[in-house]
Amino acid sequence: MRTVIYPGSFDPITNGHLDVAQRAAKLFDRVIMAVALSEGKQPLLSLDERLDLVRRSIGHLPNVEVDHFEGLLISYVEERGAQAVLRGLRAVSDFEFEFQLALINRKMSEDFETILMMPKDTYTFLSSSMVKEIARLGGDVTPFVPTAVLGALAARFGPIRRKH
């Protein structure tokens, strides 16, 4: 079974993350969206909230599952018996960072493979940080996140005002 790990903080999951997961589900037998504990990033949403939102957002994808991890990604990949790690690549500015991560991970484990996948062009500008800032300032985030995320953002920042 070809398994890929799609790690991230998913704070919150966006339509860009979902797009990458949907396309990966066509290429792999099993996709594991691995939510990182990410305490160093001071996430807006708790680990349990992020796990729940990812589960609710990918429920229509039968070969995609949700898990969490902390510590080194290479240890988690080995533990789950995955063949590769999937990383979303939004823009050229992401490439250098992702390239460095891929190389350091391969240095720590020769078997570590990284696949970089670009989301649809309509999501190349999108990040969880941008979504949180738009929601914090009272903007409409409905085009950027799965429906499940709207309630979580509204609970933090107030009602989501939708454009008509």
Image: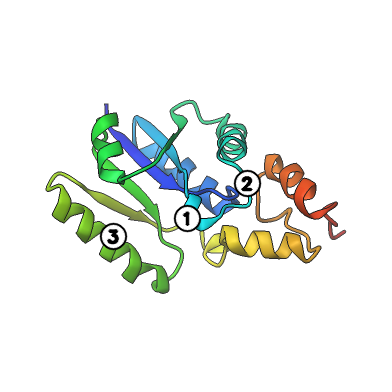
What's the coloring here? rainbow
Q: Earlier in the sequence, mark 1 or mark 2?
A: 1
**Residue 1: % across, % down:** 27, 26
Q: Earlier in the sequence, mark 3 or mark 2?
A: 2
Determine crowd level at label 2: few under 14, some 14-19, many 20+ residues with C-alpha closer than 10 A: some
Relative horizontal placement of residue 83, taking residue 46 as reference (left or right): left
Q: Is residue 33 left or right of residue 72?
A: right
Mark 3 vs mark 1: in front: 1
Q: Residue at x 60, y 37 (%)?
A: 57
- Looking at the picture, does residue 137 appear above or below residue 85? below
Residue drawn at x 35%, y 48% as measured from the top left: 86
Q: Which residue is mark 3?
A: 101
Q: Quadrant of residue 70?
A: top left
How far across and down, in percent of the image, does residue 21 sit? 47, 43
Spatial distance from mark 1 to mark 2, Cα to Cα?
13 Å
Disc 1, disc 2: CB below 8 Å? no
Graded by Cα atoms within 10 Å as few (under 14), some (14 to 19) or many (20 or more), the crowding at tag 3 reads few
Q: Helix or strand or loop: what does disc 3 sit on?
A: helix
Mark identifier at residue 45: 2
Location of residue 16 in the rendering, given as x and y in whole percent from the top left corner = 54, 54
Left or right, residue 145 beside residue 81: right
Identified by mark 1, the residue type is Gly
Q: Please state the horizontal and vertical placement of residue 51, each as a whole percent of the image.
A: 55, 35
Q: Quadrant of residue 144?
A: bottom right
Q: Amino acid at mark 2?
A: Leu
Q: Is residue 101 above or below residue 46?
A: below
Crowdedness of circle 1 by 10 Å Cα count: few (<14), some, many (20+)? few
Q: Nearer the viewer, mark 1 or mark 2?
A: 1
* Kind of residue at disc 3: Leu
Q: Residue at x 58, y 47 (%)?
A: 13
Q: Earlier in the sequence, mark 3 or mark 1?
A: 1
Residue tagged 1? 40
